[in-house]
Image (cartoon, helix red, strand yellow):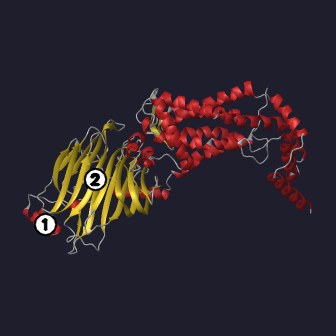
């Protein structure tokens, strides 16, 4: 029977990769203190998005005026002063095209309902981004007679017109016929982006130039996905600031930040985003994100609560801002149409080289494959091509394992000979490696080289809009978990269902580790129980991925399956251990010059040995 070896280098390489998963997993787990804080905040701020259910305990601040009540009208006019000129009253105006529906209220001139016509949630309800008071937008300012007004409390007079196929809605809060504050919306056919102008006319004598004018935008994210914890993990406030830098608030806990020179800000709700962009960057802004999810729940309706406060500058005592609203999918195909705004940077590709690979390699590559193949089959084909492209790295790794296996009898002999002298044993082992031309780190390098690919794909599958609600085999949605059985109870860290793709991926990883680590797990003293790790790692992955995107588990299953076949092919048809042994013996006969690092290490060990003798 062929003797299997302990390849520490391959294990270290694998643990480096797996360590990213463990680190990422624990980074995303809130502390007990955070959970208690979240529960308290959820009790205070949770809203109901179903109008047929009970009214929310807390809603965003709104004022109400009964225009049929003369005393209420008098009090209202007393409050808003000069802005009582407007003849506006309660009511809404609809802007819609073939992809987007917006409803704008006369009260505040703000969007009170926004949904996309081409998308539905996991339970077949239209995807609403604004609904039932979950959002509020207003501009607060002081008047010259020291009154504080907020546009959320003002009534705007609507005027709807068309310029060709473009719908134009002018909302004016009037002081007089020629003095007003205007919100102007322009909606073009087939676009999720709406032009939004904020301007004032003739109000330089009304608005106090000394006190700041502030924009306030609040939104509570509405649930769209089957797993609210999974959705909340990719629900995040992102903003472009300080000359193009992209920053984000925490995705797992409450967070707040202040920045300068804001070009746009995105209230992302996993696969959909509400974005406010401005041609005149906000000089400063304060962002707040509150997490409203503390555990998996089928009843929970909301994810995070966002808020932004940004001072606005007056030009000659007047407001003049060209802005844009975006209510639509977080999809590269759509967001790339607005290159001048840079909205595609709001997509969570990952950081550094990982995000670059994901954005410019895997996203367009998968888009090309899925245009010709079913979406699940496109994942399989992409995985095969990626593994074939990485096969030279796999070959290097397996070659290192084969060399270490050939040297194992001599290493065992050295371990036995110098078992009472650890320093001498290490010196002789390094000499053996040097003479044989074998590097003990050569098994780690291939694994490290695969890390960018690994992490890029780890971010690609959960955030790829192309996978949303695309089915494959038994998986109804490749962007969410697959289900083959519902459990009558919930298992901690696992869930209340059984997903098959994570099981297949865990089995494939187990056999891969069997091939790379072998059965002799305790041959070197001081090493941890690697056999235990070999069994634990697939089990951890089984739990970790049970609520993850089934497309990601499908990738890992196919990837590890292909890797196993490649290693078997290398072992049977490419590598010859007898030839490797002969080459190593030949290398021993040739004097090999030490590099600076090897010489320094040898000198340090010799000095340590001398110190030990003294």
Q: Is residue 137 visible?
A: yes
Q: Tell me the quarter of the picture where residue 516 sits.
A: top right
Q: Quadrant of the N terminus?
A: top right
Q: CA distance from mark 1 to mark 2?
A: 28 Å
Badge 1 or badge 2: first in the primary sequence: 1
Total tally of numbered discs in the picture: 2
Q: Secondary structure at mark 2?
A: strand
- Which residue is label 2 attached to? 196
Q: Is residue 32 left or right of residue 300?
A: right
For residue 289, which quarter of the picture? bottom left
- Label 1, secondary structure: give it: helix
The quadrant in which residue 331 appears is top left
Q: Which mark is residue 290?
A: none
Picture coordinates of residue 234, whole percent (x, y) = 45, 47
The x and y percentages for residue 49 are 29, 47
Q: Which residue is mark 1?
A: 77
Is the residue marked by circle 1 packed among few (<14), some (14-19), or many (20+) residues within 10 Å? some
Along the viewing direction, whichever of 118 and 510 lies nearer the viewer:
118
**Residue at the image position 40 percent from the left and 59 percent from the top:** 262
Q: Residue at x 79, y 46 (%)?
A: 525
Q: In percent of the image, x 75 and y 35: which residue is there?
A: 399
């Amino acid at each position: 029977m062929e003797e299997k070896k302990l390849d520490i280098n391959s294990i270290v390489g694998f643990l480096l990769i797996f360590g990213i998963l463990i680190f990422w997993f624990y980074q995303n787990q809130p502390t007990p203190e955070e959970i208690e804080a979240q529960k308290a905040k959820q009790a205070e701020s949770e809203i109901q998005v179903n109008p047929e259910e009970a009214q929310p305990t807390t809603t965003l601040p709104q004022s109400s005026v009964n225009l049929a009540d003369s005393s209420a009208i008098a009090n209202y006019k007393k409050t808003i002063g000069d802005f009582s000129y407007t003849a506006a009253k309660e009511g809404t105006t609809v802007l819609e095209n073939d992809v987007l529906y917006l409803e704008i209220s006369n009260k505040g001139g703000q969007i009170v309902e926004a949904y996309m016509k081409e998308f539905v949630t996991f339970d077949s309800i239209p995807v609403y981004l604004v609904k039932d008071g979950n959002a509020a937008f207003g501009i607060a300012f002081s008047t010259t007679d020291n009154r504080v007004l907020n546009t959320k409390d003002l009534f705007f007079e609507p005027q709807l017109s068309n310029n060709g196929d473009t719908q134009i809605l002018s909302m004016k809060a009037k002081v007089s016929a020629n003095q007003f504050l205007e919100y102007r919306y322009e909606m073009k056919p087939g676009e999720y982006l709406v032009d939004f102008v904020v301007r004032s006319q003739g109000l330089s004598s009304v608005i106090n130039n000394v006190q700041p004018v502030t924009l306030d935008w609040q939104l509570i994210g509405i649930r769209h996905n089957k797993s609210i914890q999974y959705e909340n993990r990719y629900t995040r406030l992102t903003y472009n600031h300080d000359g193009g830098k992209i920053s984000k608030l925490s995705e797992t806990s409450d967070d707040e930040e202040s920045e300068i020179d804001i070009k746009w800000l995105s209230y992302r709700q996993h696969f959909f985003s509400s974005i406010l962009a401005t041609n005149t960057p906000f000089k400063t802004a304060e962002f707040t994100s509150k997490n409203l999810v503390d555990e998996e729940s089928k009843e929970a309706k909301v994810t995070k609560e966002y808020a932004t406060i940004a001072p606005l500058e007056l030009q000659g005592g007047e407001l003049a801002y060209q802005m844009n609203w975006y209510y639509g999918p977080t999809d590269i195909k759509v967001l790339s149409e607005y290159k001048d705004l840079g909205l595609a940077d709001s997509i969570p590709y990952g950081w550094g080289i990982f995000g670059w690979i994901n954005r410019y390699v895997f996203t367009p590559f998968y888009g090309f494959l899925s245009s010709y193949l079913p979406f699940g089959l496109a994942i399989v084909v992409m995985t095969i091509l990626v593994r074939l492209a990485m096969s030279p790295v796999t070959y290097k790794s397996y070659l290192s394992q084969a060399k270490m296996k050939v040297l194992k009898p001599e290493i065992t002999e050295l371990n036995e000979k110098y078992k009472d002298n650890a320093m001498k044993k290490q010196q002789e082992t390094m000499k053996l490696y040097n003479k044989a031309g074998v590097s003990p780190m050569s098994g780690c390098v291939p694994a490290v080289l695969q890390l960018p690919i690994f992490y890029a794909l780890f971010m690609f599958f959960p955030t790829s809009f192309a996978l949303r609600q695309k089915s494959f085999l038994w998986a109804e949605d490749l962007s969410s978990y697959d289900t083959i059985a519902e459990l009558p109870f919930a298992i901690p860290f696992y869930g209340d269902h059984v997903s098959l793709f994570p099981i297949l991926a865990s089995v494939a990883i187990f056999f891969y580790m069997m091939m790379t680590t072998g059965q002799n797990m305790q041959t070197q003293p001081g090493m941890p129980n690697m056999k235990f790790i070999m069994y634990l790692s697939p089990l951890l992955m089984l739990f970790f991925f049970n609520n993850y995107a089934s497309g990601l588990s499908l990738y890992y299953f196919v990837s590890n399956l292909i890797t196993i076949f490649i290693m078997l092919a290398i072992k049977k048809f490419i590598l010859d251990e007898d030839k490797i042994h002969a080459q190593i013996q030949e290398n021993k006969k040739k004097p090999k010059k030490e590099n600076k690092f090897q010489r320094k290490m040898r000198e340090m060990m010799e000095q340590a040995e001398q110190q030990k003798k003294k």
